Image (spheres, helix red, strand yellow):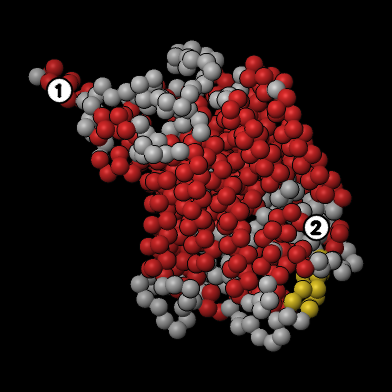
């Protein structure tokens, strides 16, 4: 009896065959992974861009005006814009009217977006318009503002700006997926790409906001740099170096803290890698051009920040340093929640269970990386977590006396992304310790639940603007905002887009068919993901994987 029970307990639960079919592809290639993930990412971010009311995102009016002014060549005509950061530009009247859109619903969660005023008058006539983004680096705005050059401007102009932003973000994210698809033992890295895509992240990719290229560039920089250092491959070095330069360029030239984040990401990635691999990369002449261009990108960004006074300066608030430290520490949980969901003008509330579920999924992967990682992996994950908590305290405490309390959780995104990516790299290095069926179920279930969380947040955000936070869910009235498509259709399309994205990323990591089939039948002898039997057959790291009991 005891033997029978032991045998039954040791037999793994079979993986449903639908999971195997969704997560397995025998035709996956790096190029195919790039194009499919590009389409999937654009479907997700594009739907967000088209379903959210115009200017229903923090600071979107200021960034839209800055984008139009950049491509139209409109200089700052204010007397003190260079010092205050608030300038005046002469742009078509369209933008001054669009800037008024959020005035009636921002910070009023029960007010629908139907209160937005109608456009009127001569929308092409030049009008002095104020923007608080006057000193921001123009790189992002020069690209996303291109639709402002089209004749006959209207609301569609901003929708096009959003779609350009979504295209840029999707291309960068697709490069991250391709980088993963080119690696051996890559299966756990699927979560390293998917879990950073919280509702806050997706909202940025569907809005006019330079932080969109900061967060997507940070993900690419993390993946490309760790791939070059922890899975060296001479045949892939050039493309990895190009992606590293692109990531460094985007992060450093997006916002005032960009160069600092690039330096920290590089230092953490170096600390997470063997010294011999670091030395080999630096000594390789094929990497010199990339290192030089990355340094140049950060230097140019820093010169702009200092020359244009891009860091905010205020008249003074008198907030003591200690008070600012205690205030920031006390709001740490709020900042963490904002990394998951900070929508609208921070006035779109999602249920606490959604925060808990999505945070738990991220915590599961981080703890798994901690448990399976080497001593170096643990120290680096711990150090990165400390930075994520300490940097907001340090920056806000220093600046609170000048400009007051300003920090939002999303500002630390470039470093927070690294926690998930580092944890997935740690699991990847020891993945042979996990049974194949367990890895398949864990990865697929985690990715699926995270996708469901995103769809729920999308539906809540849409409901807030259609009927208000306290309005009905299944009917509309004269006070309801009318999106481009019926709300239910938009939610269904968004759910399909996330299902497609999840399947594409999982298939790009390509669970081997022999492992997947064995897992589906509940075969307890199925080779473990990452083992020699379940290898990707596209090469491996240059060194054998150490056992779990060995410290790196």
Front: mark 2 or 1:
2
Which residue lies at the image location 69% right of the left edge and 87% below the top edge?
A: 121
- Quadrant where the C terminus sits is top right
Q: Who is closer to the viewer here, 501 or 537?
A: 537
Could you tell me how many numbered marks the image carries? Answer: 2
**Residue 5, disc:** 1
Residue 171 to residue 291: above or below: below
Q: In the image, 221: left or right of 493?
A: right
Q: Who is closer to the viewer here, 482 or 240?
A: 240
Q: Who is closer to the viewer here, 195 or 186?
A: 186
Q: Earlier in the sequence, mark 2 or mark 1?
A: 1
Q: Please identify the quarter of the rendering in which residue 459 is found.
A: bottom left
Residue 171 to residue 208: above or below: above
Which residue lies at the image location 71% right of the left edge and 44% below the top edge?
A: 249
Q: CA distance from mark 2 to mark 1?
A: 69 Å
The residue under label 2 is: 135
Q: In the image, 421: left or right of 317?
A: left
């Amino acid at each position: 009896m005891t033997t029978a029970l032991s045998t039954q307990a040791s037999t793994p639960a079979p993986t449903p065959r639908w999971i195997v079919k969704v997560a397995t592809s025998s035709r996956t290639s790096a190029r195919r992974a790039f194009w499919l993930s590009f389409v999937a990412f654009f479907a997700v971010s594009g739907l967000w861009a088209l379903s959210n009311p115009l200017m229903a995102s923090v600071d979107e009016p200021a960034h839209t005006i800055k984008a139009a002014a950049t491509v139209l060549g409109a200089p700052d005509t204010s007397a003190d814009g260079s010092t205050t950061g608030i300038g005046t530009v002469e742009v078509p009247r369209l933008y001054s009217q669009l800037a008024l859109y959020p005035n009636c619903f921002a910070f009023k969660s029960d007010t629908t977006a139907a209160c937005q005023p109608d456009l009127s008058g001569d929308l092409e006539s030049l009008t002095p318009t104020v923007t608080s983004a006057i000193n921001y680096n123009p790189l992002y705005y020069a690209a996303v503002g291109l639709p402002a050059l089209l004749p006959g401007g209207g609301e569609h102009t901003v929708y096009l700006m959003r779609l350009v932003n979504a295209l840029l973000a999707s291309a960068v994210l697709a490069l991250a997926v391709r980088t993963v698809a080119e690696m051996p033992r890559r299966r756990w890295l699927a979560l390293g790409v998917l879990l950073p895509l919280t509702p806050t992240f997706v909202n940025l990719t569907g809005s006019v906001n330079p932080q969109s290229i900061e967060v997507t560039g940070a993900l690419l920089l993390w993946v490309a740099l760790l791939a070059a250092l922890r899975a060296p491959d001479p045949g892939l070095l050039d493309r990895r170096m190009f992606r590293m330069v692109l990531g460094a360029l985007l992060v450093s030239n997006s916002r005032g803290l960009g160069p600092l984040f690039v330096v920290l990401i590089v230092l953490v990635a170096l600390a997470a890698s063997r010294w011999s691999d670091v030395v080999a990369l630096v000594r390789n002449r094929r990497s010199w051009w990339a290192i030089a261009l990355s340094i140049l990108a950060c230097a140019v960004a820093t010169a702009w920040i200092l020359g244009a006074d891009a860091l905010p300066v205020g008249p003074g608030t008198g907030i003591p340093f200690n008070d600012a430290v205690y205030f920031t520490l006390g709001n740490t949980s709020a900042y963490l929640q904002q990394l998951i969901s900070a929508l609208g003008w921070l006035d779109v509330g999602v249920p606490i269970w959604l925060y808990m579920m999505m945070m738990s999924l991220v915590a599961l992967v981080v703890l798994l990386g901690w448990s399976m990682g080497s001593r170096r992996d643990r120290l680096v994950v711990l150090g990165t977590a400390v930075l994520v908590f300490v940097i907001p305290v340090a920056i806000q405490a220093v600046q609170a006396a000048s400009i007051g309390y300003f920090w939002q959780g999303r500002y630390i995104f470039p470093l927070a992304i690294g926690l998930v990516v580092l944890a997935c790299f740690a699991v990847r290095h020891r993945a042979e310790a996990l049974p194949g069926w367990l890895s398949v179920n864990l990865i697929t279930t985690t990715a699926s639940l995270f996708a469901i969380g995103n769809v729920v947040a999308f539906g809540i955000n849409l409901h807030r603007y259609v009927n208000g936070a306290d309005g009905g869910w299944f009917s509309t009235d004269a006070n309801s905002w009318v999106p481009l498509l019926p709300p239910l259709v938009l939610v269904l399309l968004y759910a399909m887009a996330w299902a497609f994205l999840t399947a594409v990323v999982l298939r790009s990591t390509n669970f081997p068919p022999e492992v997947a089939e064995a897992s589906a039948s509940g075969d307890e002898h199925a080779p473990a993901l990452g083992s020699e039997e379940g290898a990707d057959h596209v090469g491996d790291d240059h060194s054998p994987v150490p056992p779990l009991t060995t410290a790196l």
